[in-house]
Image (cartoon, rainbow, N blue to C red):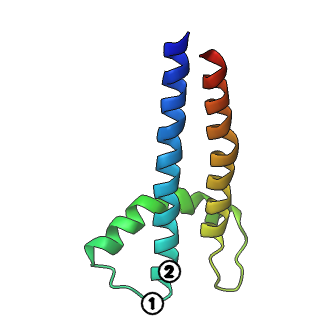
Amino acid sequence: MFVLGNFIIAIAQIIGAISTILTWIIIIRALISWVNPDPYNSIVQFLYRVTEPILMPIRRILPAMGGFDLSPIVALVGIMFIRSFLVRTLIEFGMRLK
């Protein structure tokens, strides 16, 4: 059973790393949006392509807040929940299987 435990721990660590990277990408996109970036810049296009599938469904649910986009904050809270709950649960479950 230790092999399954190690596998679950590895998956949890990968999810944790992806959530950390995604957190930073969302923060960078939010900061860049304050300075009116060039939409043809390849970095800006990459940031939009990566974050838009996450932020667009949140924007549909949230009411308009007078021009303020709160979807990055909601997305970051969701990522923090995933990191706190899912990753920790998987790691503890994997440790019990060892």
Identify whether 13 is placed above or below 60: above
Using the image, tell me which numbered label, if any, was put on residue 31.
2
Question: Residue at horizontal 50%, vertical 32%?
Answer: 11
Residue 89 lies, in percent from the top left, at: 68, 33
Inspect this view and state whether residue 53 appears: no
Question: Crowding at label 1, few (<14), some or many (≥20) Cα neighbours within 10 Å?
Answer: few
Q: How many numbered markers are drawn?
A: 2
**Residue found at the very far top of the displayed protein:** 1
Question: Residue at horizontal 48%, vertical 48%?
Answer: 17
Identify whether 61 is placed above or below 68: above
Inspect this view and state whether residue 57 appears: yes
Identify whether 39 is placed above or below 92: below
Q: Quadrant of the N terminus?
A: top right
Question: Residue at horizontal 31%, vertical 72%?
Answer: 43
48 displayed left or right of 4: left
72 displayed left or right of 61: left
- Mark 1 lies on a secondary structure that is loop
What amino acid is at disc 2?
Leu
Residue 75 lies, in percent from the top left, at: 62, 60
**Residue found at the very far bottom of the displayed protein:** 35
40 displayed left or right of 50: left
Residue 66 lies, in percent from the top left, at: 70, 86
Q: Quadrant of the C terminus?
A: top right
What amino acid is at disc 1?
Val
Using the image, tell me which numbered label, if any, was put on residue 35.
1
Residue 70 lies, in percent from the top left, at: 66, 73
Contact (Cβ within 8 Å) of mark 1 with mark 2:
yes
- Mark 2 lies on a secondary structure that is helix
Using the image, tell me which numbered label, if any, was put on residue 94.
none
Report how far apart the C-alphas of labels 1 and 2 lie in the structure.
Answer: 8 Å
Question: Crowding at label 2, few (<14), some or many (≥20) Cα neighbours within 10 Å?
Answer: few
